Each structure stands twice: as C-alpha cells, then as structure tokens.
Amino acid sequence: MSMTYSYYKNMQLNNIIFVYQGEVTADLVSSILQMVENKLEGEGEDRKVKKRVFNVMVECLQNVYHHLDALPPTDPSNPVRDKTALLMIGREEKDYYIITGNHILNDRLPDLKMRLDRINKASKEELKQLYQEVLTGTGFSEKGTAGLGMIDIARKSGQRLGYDFHPVNERYSFFSLEARVSRIAEK
Amino acid sequence: MRNLVIEPTSKTPKVILNADLGIFEITGRSIPEDAIGFYRKILDWIEEYGKSPLPDTSFKFQLEYFNTSSSKCLLDIFRKLERMHKNGHKVTIRWHYDADDEDMAETGQDYQALLDVPFELVPV
C-alpha cells in the first residue's frame, strides 16, 4: 500500500486525468470515451476544444483497438494472447495530451515510422490533400479501417505527433504515440 | 419499398430512410469500431432506392462527431447519391453542422470538393 501515495503524486504532477493499462476491448473504449467526455463537459471546457479532444481521443483509442499486435501467451498452459495496451489522457496548462502505447511487430515498424514522418513534415494544406487521397483511394485495409486515423489526428491536433518505438525483443517493439490538442481555441 | 429506421446509440447515428414521406436523414454521432458493418444496410437501401427514386431527393446529414472509418462510408453514400444525380434525378445533399464547429464545416467542404452532386453546407 505504501506505493499508493507516490502513484497519486506522480499522476498529479504529470496532470494525468486518466490512465489505463490492460486489455483493450470495444466496450472499454466506449466507457473511456463516455467518462472523459463527461469530465470535459463537467469542467466547462470550451466547446471547440472539447470536440477536438474527443475526436482525437476516438481516433487514438480506436487505432490501438484495431492495430495493436497481441503478444504470444506468456504461460504455455494458457493460450490467451496478451492484448494489453496503455491509454493515457492528461491536461496541461496549454494542451490536452492523449498518449497510447501498444506492442507492434517489428516488421510493421518501418512502414509506420515512414507514415508518421510524412505526416509530421506535412503542412496543413498537405495534410488536407493527403487526407483526401487516402479517403478516395485504395479503400479499407484488411482490418476495416481506412488508414486515415493518423492523418485525421494530425489535422485535428494541429501539432506534430510524438512517437517512440521501444525495442522489446527480436519480434516486438512497444509503440507510443502522443497527440496534443491546444486548449486555446482559435477564432 | 420498406422504410429503414435505426435508433441512435452512443456510437451510431439515428437513421431515417423513408421513401413514402421523402425523409432521408442521418443525424447524431457516428463513431463505431465497425463502420462498414453499420453502414452496409444503409448503402444497400440507397442502392435499391436509386433504381426508382422520388422526383426530388433531399438527404440531410447532421453529424456531431464521426470517426475516420465512418468518413469512408459517408463517401460511399455520397457516391451513390452522385450516381443518381448523374442519372438525371434531382438529388441534394444537405450537410448540417454546428455553426461554430469549423472542423465539421471544413469536412463538409472537403466532401463538396470531391463530389459532382449538389452539396449544400447548412450552418445551424
């Protein structure tokens, strides 16, 4: 129990509204969205900011839900694959931030990194073009999402996406993504 | 043809497709994980309706939020309406949005630019 206070202080220092570590299911995503939406509502956050945060949160959470690579079972007698991830939402003085962390197969890493770098280099206008190209282009990936998520997150965020790949073993890395939404609504 | 009415949920919009009354509406939020699954019935209905539509079809969209997988499905709906228009039927898409929601206005403009069918932006 002695850790409780340090968890609490740590979360408070990092302005964390919400943090979750565990399996990501559709129901869980719904519950988190509802909870955070209520919280934003209750605290009287600017409507535009609230909408943007909600939008970015939907894409980030659903991205993890659709694209995380489950780890092989740790216990050979228990065949359940590890589909856990980290989901975190915080509020600083100037920004909301949404951080997700999940395992990803190393094979997928170069392509993902390339896409993220391309998005981060793009201007507002280029992001719009990219969005339209993907929207009208090749259609859905095998997992039923349009590949538009990251572009949409970047457009709504208006800031560069933070990301990191932490090597886990020869097959997997841990991918973290951070999206920020400014609390200062533009006119 | 049979009307299609779908009640809203926390993740899916209210849908009214009523050819008898000439009401065609999708309103609310559209953030399902499986957008294709949700929109399949709607697309099938519009496909069928497009074979012998009313003299004038006004389709209202008023979305508070939608996720990117829904955005692709919306485009599929618009394409079907565009085809009806190209086949000589009168079709108008009305994109309603909260007047101070620039993101939703911009999304409407994005679609408008991609389509060859009357597409009105309606701030409310």
Image: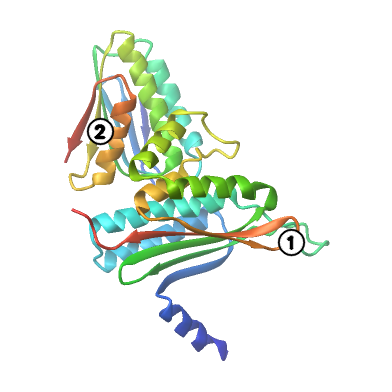
Residue A41 position within the rendered picture, expressed as x and y whole percent measured from the top left: 28, 63
Q: Amino acid at mark 1?
A: Asn
Residue B7 position within the rendered picture, expressed as x and y whole percent measured from the top left: 36, 40
Front position among marks 2 and 1 = 1
Residue A92 position within the rendered picture, expressed as x and y whole percent measured from the top left: 35, 71
Front residue of B43 and A5: A5
Residue B79 position by quadrant: top left
Front residue of B119 and B44: B119
Which residue matches tag 1? Answer: A169
Q: Residue at x 52, y 59 (%)?
A: A163
Residue B29 position by quadrant: top left
Which residue matches tag 2? Answer: B95
Binning the other alpha carbons within 10 Å of mark 1 as few (below 14), some (14 to 19) or many (20 upward) gives few
Q: Would residue A173 be seen by someone viewing this image from the given angle?
A: yes
- Judging from the image, the colouring scheme is rainbow
Q: Residue at x 40, y 69 (%)?
A: A90
Q: Output the chain of dot 2.
A: B
Q: Amino acid at mark 2?
A: Trp
Query: In the drawing, does residue A72 fall left or right of residue A61?
Result: right
